[in-house]
Image (cartoon, rainbow, N blue to C red):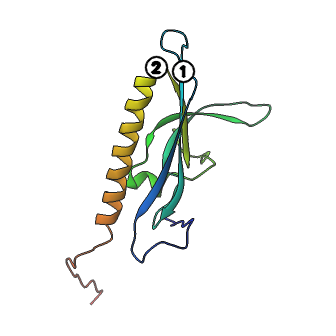
Amino acid sequence: MSTSSSSSSCAVGEISVQLNQYAQSDYVINQHRGFRLRVVAAQACGMDKEIFRYTVVRTNASTGVSEYEFSGVCTWPDLEQYPAYTADQEQDPQVVRLPYVDIVVDTEAIATEAWDTIKEEVEDLVATIAAGQTLTAGETVEISNT
């Protein structure tokens, strides 16, 4: 895993990510039929900020431009397995990691619920990566041809 650090204020061993939430400001219940939510991982310490997993749903054959569908917050193995910004053409399904999620849902209440879920899943991700930084000595095996 590469570890990006958008800020020089990261403490040694710190695992963190800053999330910035942006929400539609003009919304009237029963008048507007959709609500937009954008979450950006703006800074990270000791981990990548490309923590949002997208699946490639189609690629335009003539332009080569891919369309992505948000599929969730990455797990720690996802950070290791999937590339940031450009999907690996050899993987099936093709998955890419981006530093933001931008979704449109039916109501403001659903957007609020999505924001709460994203925060919980990112907290779990940070805790998991932090826990993995401390290793305990395990088994030692000597393998020899004699």
User: Where 51 sits versus 59, above or below?
Assistant: below
Residue 98 in view in this figure: no
Tell which circle, 1 or 2, labels the residue nearer the N-terminal end. 1
Per the image, the residue denoted by label 1 is 27
Residue 100 drawn at (x, y percent): 55, 44
Nearer-the-camera pick, 61 or 100: 100
Query: Can you tell which mark lies on residue 107?
Result: 2
Residue 41 drawn at (x, y percent): 52, 51
Residue at mark 1 to residue at mark 2: CA–CA distance: 9 Å
- Residue at the (54%, 65%) spot, across then down: 4
At mark 1, the secondary structure is loop
Amino acid of disc 2: Thr
Query: Can you tell which mark lies on residue 139?
Result: none
Residue 67 drawn at (x, y percent): 64, 32
User: Where 41 sits versus 141, above or below?
Assistant: above
Q: Is residue 80 left or right of residue 60?
A: left
- The C terminus, quarter of image: bottom left
At mark 2, the secondary structure is loop
Task: In the displayed orientation, state which residue is furthest to the bottom.
Answer: 146
